[in-house]
Structures are given as C-alpha cells and as structure tokens.
Image (cartoon, rainbow, N blue to C red):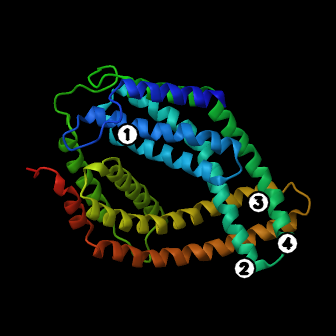
Amino acid sequence: MENFSQYSRLIKSALEKNEPGIPITPQTELNAAIKRIFADHLLIILKMAPVALQSSDPEGIHKTRVALRRLRTAIKTFKPHLTTSIYQKIKASAKILNKPLGIIRDLDVLTLHFLHYADTELQDDSALLLWQSIFNQAYNPATRELYTTFTTEPFLNFIQVLEEVITSPSANPIIFNTQEDLASSVDHFFPDKILYLSNKILQYEFDSQTEIALFHKLRIDVKRFRYTLEFFSETLEPEAYKELVQSLENLQDDLGEIQDAVIADHLLLSLVQIAVNQPNNQETIHLINQYQQFRQKELSTLRNSFLHTWEEFKNANPTALLQNSLSLYPPQN
C-alpha cells in the first residue's frame, strides 16, 4: 500500500504550494474552484482506497465509490472548461476504477438484503450455507479485480492526471479551455448551471405505468443536481440549502432502492448460471429463484410508493428552495 501514502503526501504537498485551502465564494475564479473540488475528492479516495482493499468492512468500498462517483460528476460538469485531452484522460481512468467498485458494492447490497430476507422469510440456516457458497464464487473474482485495479497502473494513471490538473496554474492552456465565452468565475457559472439541472428534474412525470428505465434516468439527474449543489455549498444560504438537500436525499433513497432491486434481478440471473455447475444445484437454483420472485414483488411495491415521494418532493417547492439557496449571489440578468 506504499503507493497510496506516497501519492497522498505528493498531492497534499502540491496543494500547500498551489492556492492552499482556498474558500469557494461566488467571486472565486472558476478554474481555481475546479482544482479545489477535484483535490477534495481525490484526497478522500486516497484515504479510503487502502481501507477498501485491506478491510472486509463494506464502508471502505462504499466511501471510495461515493467519492469517485462525485468526482465523475465534477468531471462531467466541468467538461467545457477542460481541454479535450485532459477531459478524456480523467474520464477514462475514472471509469476503469469505477467498474470493480460498482460490482462489489452491488454484491454487498444484495447479500445484506438476502440475509434479512432469509431471517424473516426462511428461518433456515441451510439456505445461508447455499447462498454463501454461490455468492463467494461471484465475490472472490470481483475482489481480485478491485485489488489489481487499485494497486497497479490504472490507479496511478488516475492520480497522476488529476495531480496535473490540481497543481497546474489556472490559466494553463494545456489543462484548461481558454475560450473567451466560457464563465471565468463561480457566479458566472453556478447559478445558471444549477437552475438548468433543477428544471431538468422537474420535467419528469411518473405514474403507475412508467417504464423502469425512467426511474434510473431520474436517479442520475438527481445525483448530478445534488452533487453540483454540494460542490458549491459554501456559497449557498445554509438553511435553504439544508432543506433542499434533505428533500433530494429522500428522493435519492427511494430511487436507490428501486435501482438496487433492478440490479438484484440481473445479479441473481448470473448466480443461477454459476449454480448450474455446482453440487446440489437444483436446491440452490430453487433458492435463488424463490428470492428473485420476492425481489420482483418488492420492486413493484417500491415503484408505487415512489409516486408518493415524488409528489412530496414537488410539493416542497424545490424551485423556491433553490432560489433561496442562491440568495447570496448577485441578482441574475
């Protein structure tokens, strides 16, 4: 794990020499804010990745994945302000890291849910033994891929390209796009961007017949809206911001449960394929199929309950909450 501590020291040292700990205000130069946001999330990843690899605690993996997910949102949000070369490098390296984290997180969530299901619905220890046997055959290769990805070239490439951005002068044309029509400060960028993301969310409509794919699209847009808010939280009116984030978290929680149920359906199909070649496979396949039917019924219930959450979110008047959050900014033309 020496690579982690080595690069963590390198980044921290570079930050101390290059606009150390700058606060983000409406008047902050946007490229300086971008560097600060990238650095904040990279340092979390550098801190949590060794925990994810060395510990059986799923929290290490979860925190690493969340920091990477937020960083990927930042990369997309600030794409116009980065040169094409830098953007493509960061995007590609972040995508490589995200894959094994996502697989393990999905398997962890699936198992936690199954354990609760087995405890409440089955009361049968033999089912747990069957599950553990088949689960390990999916989980062990995923952990090996995670370890390989985060201890070799992909992770080091990711750190190096981000360090290049973070330590570069804000006017470096190799890193930052120098087009004159781009916003140069936070107050010329953030209000328009966050209002656009808010309006995009409020255009969705849901009923009992809505296709499942639309829930996932909304989930992506809600995450991007919330994370972008959080990038600039220092510039927002605290009480309105806190209330808006709480309503987004409620929405995100429901959408996350729906997505977990959808992913579970795909994962269970892959576990059936593994079970085909195992001893006692009929018993194992029956267990998986039984659990899959339970998850499918649960998904139907989650979809219906989301309609209430969605109405609550809209009734909370998120547009007014956002406008109040932006009250510290100069009036927009």
Q: Amino acid at mark 4?
A: Asp
Q: Which residue is mark 1?
A: 37
The residue wearing badge 2 is 120
* Position of residue 301 in the picture relative to residue 242 (left or right): right
Horizontal and vertical percent position of residue 295: 64, 71
Q: Percent from the top left, x then y, of residue 119?
A: 75, 76
CA gap, disc 2 and disc 4? 12 Å
Q: Is residue 315 left or right of residue 93?
A: left
Amino acid at dot 3: Val
Q: Residues within 10 Å of mark 1 (few under 14, many from 20)?
A: many
Instruction: Identify which amino acid the numbered label 1 is placed on.
Output: Ile
Marking on residue 125: 4
Q: Which circle marks residue 218 in the picture? A: none
**Mark closer to the chain start, 2 or 1:** 1
Residue drawn at the location 39% of the way across and 31% of the way down: 87
Vertical side of 310 occupied by 170: above or below: above
Residue in the image at 29% along x and 32% along y: 32
Nearest-to-viewer mark from 4 and 1 = 1
Mark 2 residue element: helix
The answer to which of marks 3 and 4 sits earlier in the sequence is: 4
The reply to whether dot 4 and dot 1 touch (C-beta < 8 Å) is no
Question: Where residue 4 sits in the image (x, y, percent)?
Answer: 60, 31
Instruction: Say which mark, if any, is on residue 272.
Output: 3
State the CA–CA distance, disc 2 to disc 1: 44 Å
Mark 2 or mark 4: which comes first in sequence? 2
